[in-house]
Image: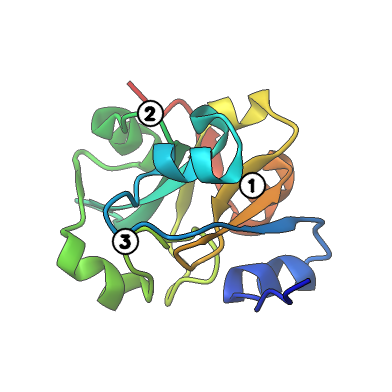
């Protein structure tokens, strides 16, 4: 069996002694969306969470972690994050801000410790998947453990 190289996100979970599974899948540059990733890892899209990089007018950069088939409600995120307004960070800014590329953005191990907000539907599952910080790799773990590891506030974030 091929040994999987650990990412910063996985090392953070190791340090916190959190149980997780790393799941790899073939990367399709044309289909980096979470619904496609869910098919590749054999999970329903509502159980594979995507990390979105957002900027609040008061807080600056924050992460929204929502189900792969969900659409972020920017007004709800603004409300729970203490902002009046939130907008998606432009794609060209994501790498310099986070150290991650599109399709590989994780709420763990970014360049800075940005505030994390996770959609409450994470609580519906024993395990959810989030990006391990690389395209082609997901971390599967208990939502409560991921909330603890990221320091996430959990609330309703999808439309």
Image vertical order of residue 111 relative to residue 47, above or below: below
Say if residue 29 shows up in the picture. yes
The Cα atoms of the two marked residues, 1 and 3, are separated by 22 Å
The Cα atoms of the two marked residues, 2 and 3, are separated by 17 Å
**Which residue is pictured at 56% across the width and 26% down the height?**
121
Q: Which label's residue is closer to the chain start, 1 or 2? A: 2
Disc 2 target residue: 70
On the image, the x and y values in percent for residue 141 come to 72, 48
Q: Quadrant of residue 28?
A: bottom left
On the image, the x and y values in percent for residue 52 come to 35, 50
Q: Are marks 1 and 2 in contact (CB under 8 Å)?
A: no
**Which residue is pictured at 51% across the width and 39% down the height?**
38
Could you tell me which quadrant the C terminus lies in? Answer: top left
Q: Are marks 2 and 3 in contact (CB under 8 Å)?
A: no
Position of 145 with respect to 75 (left or right) is right
Query: In the drawing, what numbered circle is on residue 147?
Result: 1
Q: Quadrant of residue 23?
A: bottom right
* Front-most of residues 148 and 132: 132
Disc 3 target residue: 102
In what element is the residue under mark 2? loop
In what element is the residue under mark 3? loop
In what element is the residue under mark 1? helix
Q: Which label's residue is closer to the chain start, 1 or 3? A: 3
Q: Disc count in the image?
A: 3
Position of 73 with respect to 25 (left or right) is left
**Foreground tag (1 vs 2):** 2
* Front-most of residues 124 and 22: 22
**Foreground tag (1 vs 3):** 3
Image vertical order of residue 86 relative to residue 63, above or below: above
Position of 81 with respect to 118 (left or right) is left
The Cα atoms of the two marked residues, 1 and 2, are separated by 19 Å
């Amino acid at each position: 069996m091929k040994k999987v190289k650990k990412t910063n996100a996985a090392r953070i979970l190791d340090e916190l002694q959190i149980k997780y599974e790393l799941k790899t899948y073939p990367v399709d540059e044309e289909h980096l969306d979470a619904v496609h990733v869910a098919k590749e890892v054999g999970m329903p899209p509502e159980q594979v969470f995507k990390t979105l990089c957002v900027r609040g007018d008061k807080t600056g950069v924050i992460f929204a972690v929502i189900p792969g088939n969900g659409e972020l409600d920017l007004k709800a995120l603004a409300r729970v994050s203490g902002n009046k307004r939130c907008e998606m960070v432009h794609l060209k800014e994501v790498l310099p801000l986070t150290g991650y590329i599109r399709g590989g953005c994780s709420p763990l191990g970014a360049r800075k410790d940005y505030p994390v907000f996770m959609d409450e539907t994470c609580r519906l599952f024993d395990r959810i998947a989030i990006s391990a910080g690389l395209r082609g790799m997901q971390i599967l773990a208990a939502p409560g453990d991921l909330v603890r590891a990221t320091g996430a506030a959990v609330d309703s974030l999808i439309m």
